[in-house]
Image (cartoon, rainbow, N blue to C red):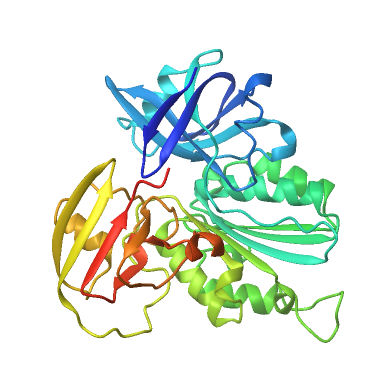
Amino acid sequence: MEQQIYKGKLIKFHPLKIAKKVQLTKNTFSLEFDIPENLKANFKFEAGQYVSVKFQSHGKEVINDYSMTSAPYEGKICLGIKVNSPDGATAQLFQNYNKEDELWISEPAGRFTLVSKPSEFRTIVAFAAGIGITPILSHFKNILHNEPRTRLFLFFGNKSSDELVYRDQLDNLARTCGDRLQIFYFFSQEKTADQFFYGRLDEKKLNLIINQILHLDDTDEESTIWDAVDEVLICGKGEMIKTLANACYHHGIPKRNIHFELFEEFNDDIYPVEKEFPLIENIEVEFTMLGKKYTTQLPDNKDKILQQLLIQKFPVPYSCKSGICGSCECSLEEGEVELIENEYLTEKEESQGHILACMSIVKSQKIKLNFDLS
């Protein structure tokens, strides 16, 4: 039995039983689901992906997205979840659902993923804050399992040691794979013996990390570890992602090698818009969504398509407004737009005319969009 809902795209849900529930810290917990044989193909996933969980909260149906901490080779779905408010939906999920209870879980989604390269020597650096460690943990377990030549560096920020989630798992990985994995913990509201590890992960801290930790490279005396970085993973709140992504870019990492996952709605651009566009006024817009056709007019092209449609109260799908989640993906059937940034679409999808409404500026007098891609 399955259920389908529309969240920008058609999402399929299946009932899974909770195999294990563990409280990790005062305000975080984990849920583990075993996957029955008949659903193995439906729940095949890549490291860094997430699932949507459908449950009842205060008498209403709620759907929340949670990243997996499990790696694909483990054959199960493990979620790390933070309770942000004692009266919120996630608190209800913790209080009302226990081992052997059934929840509706979506098939895995998301593109905070990496191409596996087991035969290459790679250096991957990750920055995480709080519960943002969840997809990073999935990535690191997967890489350590599949890529014997890849070395990993994790810089993990939390308010205090009491709120540091998954420390046992991380420390165990560091012990067993110490030649390939180094982990550094930072605390913003707890004094540390070494001042270096006190404070938030931001541009200033990155400069120190590059100069004091990622400097000498034992494998190449003529370069630094930072010079050898192949991929950067960042997961946390929007401001942290924006700060660190730009800092990494300005320190020489190409944007295509900086990957990030957002854990909240974020209305700002990750990278500054450096291009100016000719002004177009009174733009005609037609779009299809859930089989219904809409028409409207945008006053000009000074802002991106999604933001302008939301101002006009159209129920267009979105989550982050920053080009990361892909909820506002649609096809451009007529007209011309410019996709300012793209962390989500593949080259094939772009060639097929797919765009992200939240990252697109109109460049023609009329455009026609279709949000019904499934």
Residue 111, x across and y down, in percent: 55, 52
Seen in the picture, residue 26 relative to 362 is either above or below; the reply is: above
Residue 54, x across and y down, in percent: 41, 27
Nearer to the camera, 112 or 239 = 112
Residue at left offset 22%, top offset 76% = 302
Quadrant hosting residue 331: bottom left
Assign the C terminus to one quadrant of the image.
top left
Quadrant hosting residue 274: bottom left
Quadrant hosting residue 80: top right
How many numbered badges does the structure rendering display? 0
Residue at left offset 83%, top offset 64% = 120
Q: Is residue 36 visible?
A: no
Q: Is residue 92 left or right of residue 192?
A: left
Nearer to the camera, 136 or 218 = 136
Residue at left offset 73%, top offset 47% = 142
Residue 17, x across and y down, in percent: 56, 17
Q: Is residue 338 left or right of residue 248?
A: left
Nearer to the camera, 374 or 222 = 374
Seen as rendered, the residue at the extreme front is 334
Seen as rendered, the residue at the extreme top is 100
Nearer to the camera, 154 or 69 = 69
Q: Is residue 174 visible?
A: yes
Residue at left offset 33%, top offset 66% = 268
Residue 306, x across and y down, in percent: 27, 60
